[in-house]
Amino acid sequence: MTYCVGILVEEGLVMIADTRTNAGLDDISTYRKLHMFTKPGERVLALASAGNLSVTQSVLSLLTEGVEDPNTGKPETIYDAPTMFRAAQLIGRAIRKVRAIERAGFEAAQLRFEVSFLFGGQIGDGPMRLYMIYSAGNFIACSQDAPFLQIGEHKYGKPILDRAVTFRTDIYDALKVGLVSMDSTMRSNLGVGLPIDLTVIRRNTCDTEVLHRIEAGEPYFHDLRERWSAALRAAHRAIPRPPYGPGTK
């Protein structure tokens, strides 16, 4: 299991991903799920992945080696895509190509072809975009009315994002809320865990402002977790008890 979240606000983009790929009692492993494709000043692209690791790796390889453009017949890489929309289409084509190659093996082993991506960033002076790309290769775009997208184990972190994030939210407040949603997910599902990779990309810069990995024991993240737990305990104590017991009207 995994948890990745992308938040697109007026100032720019925040992407956060955990790294856990296995969570057995004696077999915990990690793998980077947030991948960057950058040419400073020209394009800055972030791709977060969830699902079958072998499929993810194959898609990533195709994105850098090239996928045939159906219009020209020539290989196109993620560094060649002229717009974010065309780049999202390229990722979709890469997913479908891997599916076509691996379908027989997956079916023989009775395995589901599961993969999804969050893809965000900016190319040149084009608009900043955030997409969710599904295992069929189709995708949806983030909007101002719903300024975040999630993949993986999203249900524990979504209520926090729903209540706290709008398109006008400060970009570093969005990062903070995204980390709270990650902590809530980690507390409820052992399949999501440290280290956590994150990036902050400010709109119209075509470069990363922050690219950071949170390791176990990092003071800020530890403090954030403790403060959030304390705030929740204080909030529930401050709310009056329900007037439903014996002797109440």
Image (cartoon, grey):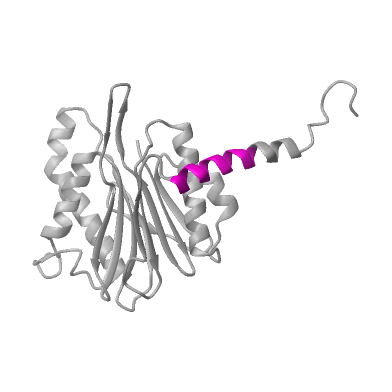
Residue furthest to the bottom in view is: 125
Frontmost residue, 45 versus 176: 176
Indicate the quadrant containing the N terminus: top left, top right, bottom left or bottom right.
Answer: top left
Using the image, determine if residue 199 lies above or below residue 151.
Answer: below
Q: Quadrant of residue 145?
A: bottom right
In the image, is residue 149 part of the stretch drawn in magenta? no
Indicate the quadrant containing the C terminus: top left, top right, bottom left or bottom right.
Answer: top right
Q: Position of residue 178 (x, y in %)?
A: 47, 51
Judge left or right: residue 245 versus residue 186: right
Q: Residue at x 19, y 52 (%)?
A: 60
What predominant SS class does the magenta segment belong to?
A: helix
Magenta stretch bounds? 219-232
Q: Position of residue 236 (x, y in %)?
A: 70, 37
In the image, is residue 224 part of the stretch drawn in magenta? yes
Judge left or right: residue 100 versus residue 43: left
Q: Residue at x 26, y 61 (%)?
A: 89
Q: Position of residue 126 (x, y in %)?
A: 34, 76
Q: Residue at x 26, y 59 (%)?
A: 36
The number of callouts visible is 0
